């Protein structure tokens, strides 16, 4: 059987799935338990990412208001990048 470049890409880009299609009630319950167990951490990480994103947006806005080439411009640029 010949393997296509797309197959190689898919295998390299996407790790094996943690979950397979649900075929039983028990399996569905296990998935729900996993979801509940990890959901709080997921929400916390989303909130942290949002906070960091807002910080970068604020720094970029401040940086754009500074005259290019000034010392403050370079300092803000370094903090943003």
Image (cartoon, rainbow, N blue to C red):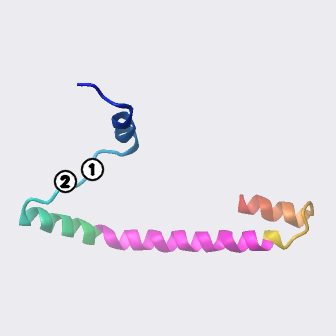
CB atoms at circles 1 and 2 under 8 Å apart? yes
Residue pointed to by mark 1 = 17
In percent of width and height, residue 37 lies at 27, 69
Q: Secondary structure at mark 2?
A: loop
Q: Is residue 49 above or below residue 23?
A: below
Between residues 45 and 64, which one lies in front from this camera angle?
64
Residue pointed to by mark 2 = 20
Label 1, residues with CA under 10 Å away: few <14, some 14-19, many ≥20: few
13 in magenta: no
Give the magenta range: 38-62
Q: Is residue 52 above or below residue 13?
A: below
Q: Secondary structure at mark 1?
A: loop
Q: Among all residues in the image, which is located at the extreme top?
A: 1
Point out the image quarter for the C terminus: bottom right
Point out the image quarter for the N terminus: top left
- Give the side of residue 28 with respect to residue 75, left or right: left
In percent of width and height, residue 4 lies at 34, 31
Q: Residue at x 38, y 32 (%)?
A: 5
């Amino acid at each position: 059987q010949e393997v296509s470049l797309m197959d190689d890409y898919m295998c390299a880009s996407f790790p094996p799935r943690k979950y397979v299609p649900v075929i039983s009630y028990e399996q569905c319950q296990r998935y729900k338990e996993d979801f509940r167990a990890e959901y709080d951490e997921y929400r916390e990480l989303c909130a942290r990412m949002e906070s960091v994103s807002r910080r970068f947006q604020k720094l970029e806005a401040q940086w754009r208001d500074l005259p290019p080439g000034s010392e403050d411009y370079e300092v803000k640029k370094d903090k943003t990048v």
